[in-house]
Image (cartoon, rainbow, N blue to C red):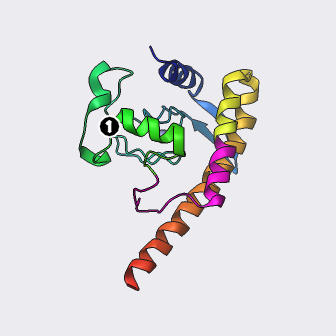
Amino acid sequence: MSELNDKRQLFENICQNVSVRVKHQISITRVTCPCCGYPTLKERSRHEICRLCDWEDEGEDDLHYPDDHQYIGGANGAYTLSDARENFARYGVMYPPDHIAFTGSDPEQRRALKQDLMGLYDQLLDAAPSEYPALWKRAITVERSLSKETEKSLKEAYAARLNK
Ligand SMILES: [Zn+2]
């Protein structure tokens, strides 16, 4: 199995029913994004869009189906899982820089939040289970800021389109 999928398996083992207090007590269970490998998804195959790499999860995955990384079409358009992974490794999103994504390229602010978030997720891999709640609490705060940033970009992109 590839290094990425080994890492995903680890994440999926430790991201089960972690009890975290953020305002209220919540229970966190995550599965990993097949493109970037981070625990960003609540469930698989629900068309969730990964907050880190923009991959839309319609279920294809070579973790369970070895040939699935060459599938073209569907929600991720012209990008196979392999292309998307390569782009993520290189550019931090599943698209190459010349692809005009709906949310535009990552502005500096969003890029910085993503770096923070990946750092926190990575710390989970080396942490003791007693440290998971505190790390998740910080991760959730960054995830929320990131969602706000993305929403802001979407609104700006939409307004720009209307003004054309
Ligand atoms: Zn992802």
| Quarter location, residue 56 | top left
Looking at the picture, does residue 146 appear above or below residue 76?
below
| Residue 79 located left or right of residue 154 | left
Query: Which region of the structure is painted magenta?
Result: 97-117
Any part of residue 40 in sight: no
Residue 97 is situated, as x and y percent measured from the top left of the image, at 47, 54
Amino acid under disc 1 = Thr
Of all residues shown, which one is farthest toward the bottom?
Answer: 163
Name the residue nearer the viewer: 139 or 61. Answer: 61
Residue name at image x 55 percent, y 69 percent: 152
Q: Position of residue 29 (x, y in %)?
A: 53, 33
Q: Is 101 positioned to the left or the right of 71 in the image?
A: right
**Quarter where residue 128 is shown:** top right
Q: How many marks on residues?
A: 1
**Which quadrant is the N terminus positioned in?**
top left
Residue 70 seen? yes
Per the image, label 1 sits on a secondary structure element best described as loop
Instruction: Give 54 or 87, whichever is nearer the viewer.
Output: 87
